[in-house]
Image (cartoon, rainbow, N blue to C red):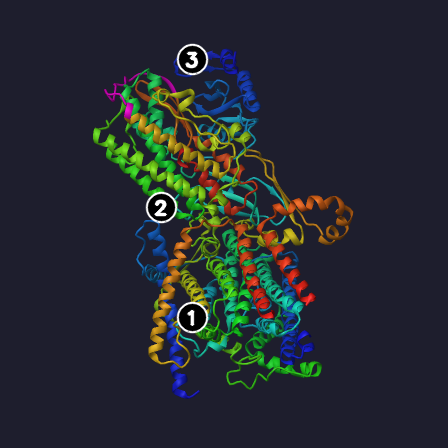
Amino acid sequence: MTILTALLDEGGPIPAHRPFPRALVREATWQRAIGHLASGELTLLSVWGDVGHVHMALLEDEDHRIAVLTLPCPDGTYPAIGQTHPPAIRLERAIRDLFGYDPVGLPDPRGWLDHRDGTAYAFLPVEGEGLHQIPVGPVHAGIIEPGHFRFTCDGETVVRLEQRLGYVHKGVDELFSGAPLDRAARLACRVSGDSAAALGLGFARAVEAALGVVPPPRAVWLRALMAEMERVANHLGDFGAICNDASFTIIMAHCAVLRERMLRAAHDAFGHRLIMDRIVPGGVTMDLDEANRTAIAALADDVRKKFTALTLLYDRTASLQDRTVTTGILKPELARQFGAGGYVGRASGRAFDSRKHPGYAPYDSLSFEVPVLTEGDVNARVWIRVREIGQSLNLIEQILRDMPEGDIQTVVPAGSGEGMSLTETFRGDVLVWLRLNGGVVDRCHVRDASWFQWPLLEAVIEGNIVADFPLCNKSFNCSYSGHDL
Amino acid sequence: MNEPASLWLLLVQFAQMSLVICLAPLLTGLVRKVKARLQRRRGPPLLQPYRDLRRLMLKQVVLAENASWLFRVVPYLMLSITWVAAALVPTFATGLMFNWTGDLIAIAGLLGAARFAQALAALDIGTSFGGIGSSREVMFASLAEPATMMIILCVALVAGSTQLSTIADHMANGAVGLRVSLALALIALIIVALAENARIPVDNPATHLELTMVHEAMVLEYSGRHLAMIDLAAFLKLLLYLSLIGCIFFPFGIAQAGAGPEYYLIGLAFYVMKLMLGGVLLGVFEMSIAKLRVFRVPNFLGAGFMLGLLGVLLLYVSRGM
Amino acid sequence: MAYWANGLPAGAALALTAALFHVFNHSVFKSLLFFGSGAVLTATGERDMEHLGGLIHRMPKTAFAFLVGCAAISALPPLNGFVSEWLTFQAIVLNPDLPQWGLKIAIPADGALLALSAALAAACFVKAFGVCFLGRPRSTQAASAREVDYFSLAPMFILAAICLLAGVLPGVVVDSLEPVTTSILGGRMPTQLGDRWLSLVPMSAGRSSYNGLLVFLFITASTLIVVFLVHRFASNAIRRSAAWDCGFPDPRPETQYTAESFAQPIRRVFGSVVFRTREVVDMPLPGDMRPARITRFARDVAWDGLYIPVAAAVGAMADWMNVLQFLTIRQYLAFVFIALVALLTALALWQ
């Protein structure tokens, strides 16, 4: 018997929750789960608040089994996971800000998404003589999202880095509640605009799981095509941007062209550059015609050729390699502890990819590899992206070749139920959990991959100087919007 | 020195002073254009730096509340000191009226004074970005100055003078021939020039990343006409270094003292061509290399110093035996 | 001295004049800087730079005089420090006239060290002035400092004026040093005041010259032109606002550079060899609330360099040869430098 089934057996199962099991547990079981998290046997997928309850989603690394534990908290308090398992701290601070539940024993008493304390926010202490602080942001010189970074330094040496996020808090949780499915699907795509297709897919899959709807096969394949095109476009952008941060602009210039062509192909095929609102519960809204099918196939082929040349240029430019190799090392233990997804985890030896485990259609019938490296530096994160672009281009070709014919949408009944999905965006796995009640969303929680990547960025700066931080940051490329909700 | 001749020299001197300040933004525009074309971008028009200066000049200055008089005075000083330094370098003609007021060392000293002023102004508001820029700048300067001195020494030993007009005349007369020492000094000077002008691989003039900045971090709090003057000073400094390289190492076509007006025109044409070539080469070089890590810059400048020193020692060896 | 011994009285006079000028300058601006420090101490009761800041607003006159001293000691034109540095370099440029190989090599190395020390002085005084007088106050004493009285200010301003005058009219100083050089060396530099434009011409006009007065006038003139043009054609509008500082102007004094931080890059570049400084950073993992900590170690090179090696020399030799393969470029460059100088010195001695 595995740890998760043992924990589930201690509570009362809730049959309406699909596809992963959920159980209503008592405090003792909750505490035991925290113990397993702290000892590293389980990985935290998310923790979120609900009316009168808190939920935690857990992943068992051994067999990739997933389950949700729910603890009632009628008096507004519950035992904090963050007390012994740091990855939960920010999520629990967010729960305290958004739901008013008090995580008992949480070491950090400060707000997180709630910014009413303004500049009185107390940054964590640093000891040592003659140190100074560098407040960076929330307004940056470039066109990027707002976030505040507080460095405490001795000259160039960083002694502590602390992030402060929440500047783009939009109240997504509240907007979901009571929204009809079509509006909720649009909202899901806008949680983080750069992963619109994958977030739409995640929401659609959760709805379909809750209602027991099976989308037609062609829609499933089209969704994968959209998600892979989005992944290629974003990885191309990141690859260029990382090189640009080392002031090697030529790679960025070429990547920008390739990315733009990918976006235009998406626009031609699906009517939207970022493929927003094309993936909806029950299927997709646009079919792929023959002309666009050949156009995308030709583009994938061309991108592969041109990108190979760029990869060679990256690999052979010694001055660029000097910037990325050994910069910003993320230790595999930390990546594992935080359950870091995407290129952040895979560059530090964590091979998790939700397309493989737990896996979803049509990836079970496609052949692709999940690249893994163990160096954990900026260079490794670059190479993971490079390999993933290659894999995604392969996937696009397979999809275009083998895509079945047929309908692209099925009717979604106005039912009730609970659904959950784990979907791979270009950043990593996104968890969508929702409860439907008579065709409207009662409660929806979206946990972006960035939640478990942002804290790690604070750790990778160790041993690096201030001037190398932008490179580390870009190699993480976490979402502000997806995190601030 | 009879009166008409010295009036003529004065005229040429003023022509040169206005020439450098008029050409400087164009040179930067050219470098930006070259870089843009290499990035497959159309790039801003060549005259964009002039428009930027005009736009900044006409804008209101937003001054930090605790800025002192020093903060407001420094842009004027930087521009005027850099301008004087640029005016001391023979561009298209040697033997100008005021060439003898200062030599290579004085030019290095003037640029040092401008840098000193800027580093101080960066600390005036009391933000950490100013501090970052300022502390990096003085660290680089502490390595660039010994290298500069080695280059000056090397050139002075070849030409027997630290006076730029004399050096240019000496080099232009062709008696020098090809010397290994001078080649080493040239490379060293290019290294120093890249560092002093905040170019890649030492600094990135186009970056938006505050934490990696050196020059831009120091001027982060400036706006309006103050920023325009600092920008113009930076343009002038780039022009100065290219002129310096041109006049010491490639002085062909430069008009000699007392030459007729036609020689001045030829000198001018050569000078503009040299600047264009220098600007294009700089653009190409900047595209082909990533920025160095901050603590690799000392190695880079150290290499410059070593090349200068090697040049000097080689001169001794070649003369001694 | 070397020039004298080799029968080069002009060079010797130049070198000695440069040295005397340098001594004179130091007596002026060092006094000025000490007066300035005294004024700051009186006004704030603070000796520690890390508790000062923003004094330019509270003590503008002291700040101005101190600034002149800082610029002078950093050898910046048109002040006096630059003139003596310039003269010293002129003496260095003469050095190939020397017959001895050893000196030939030692003197350019001297020049490099001189440039290095001038640049480091500039760095040091940017730090000193920047941390004490600029920025925001780091303590209540600094925030409530009062300008010192005129008796304290007067000597500072006199010394600052001497710094400027000696820089602008160096010929006067050089000529007044002439009796000393004549009595010691029996030679002298050419008289300077005779020149039409008051230029400083150590050897001959074609060789090198420096005119402090003209440089000063040039700077003044071009500043005036710039001021005139800018205020004639540019916008004169000005508005006070909070500092930009990336949208988060945190009023706490910790958010500005400290003296310690300012010097850290230089310390890291030079200090790793000279003082063997080391920093140990204890950075807690994400989510850990305990304080981060930095500890610095500086060791005395003399102790490590003289006593410990004797004890450990035998055992270390073997390891040391291995280490040679893993040095940084900077260290390799230092080796190249030392090797070159050593080889050429050996060559000189052998000849």
Q: What residue is shown at x 39% (from left), y 69% (from top)?
A: B20
Amino acid, disc 3: Ile
- Asked if labels 3 and 2 touch by Cβ distance under 8 angstroms, the answer is no
Quarter occupied by residue A171: top left
Rendered view: C238 above or below C160: above
Report how far apart the C-alphas of labels 1 and 2 lie in the structure: 37 Å
Residue numbers of the magenta segment: A401-420
Q: Which residue is mark 3?
A: A14
Q: Position of residue A280 (x, y in %)?
A: 29, 25
Residue B276 got which mark? none
- Residue pushed farthest bottom? B2
Characterize the local packing of mark 1: few (<14), some (14-19) or many (20 or more) Cα atoms within 10 angstroms. many
State the CA–CA distance, disc 2 to disc 3.
Answer: 53 Å
Write down the residue under mark 1: B251
**Residue at image x 50%, y 56%?**
B125
The chain that hosts pointer 2 is A
Q: Secondary structure at mark 3?
A: loop
Residue position marked by numbered label 2 in the rendering: A253
Q: Chain of mark 1?
A: B
Q: Amino acid at mark 2?
A: Ala
B282 falls in the magenta region: no
How dense is the environment of label 3, judged by Cα within 10 Å: few (below 14), some, or many (20 and up)?
Answer: some
Eye-nearest disc, 1 or 2 = 1
Say which quadrant the C terminus of chain A sits in: top left
Q: Position of residue C225 (x, y in %)?
A: 41, 73
Kindly identify which chain the residue marked by label 3 belongs to: A
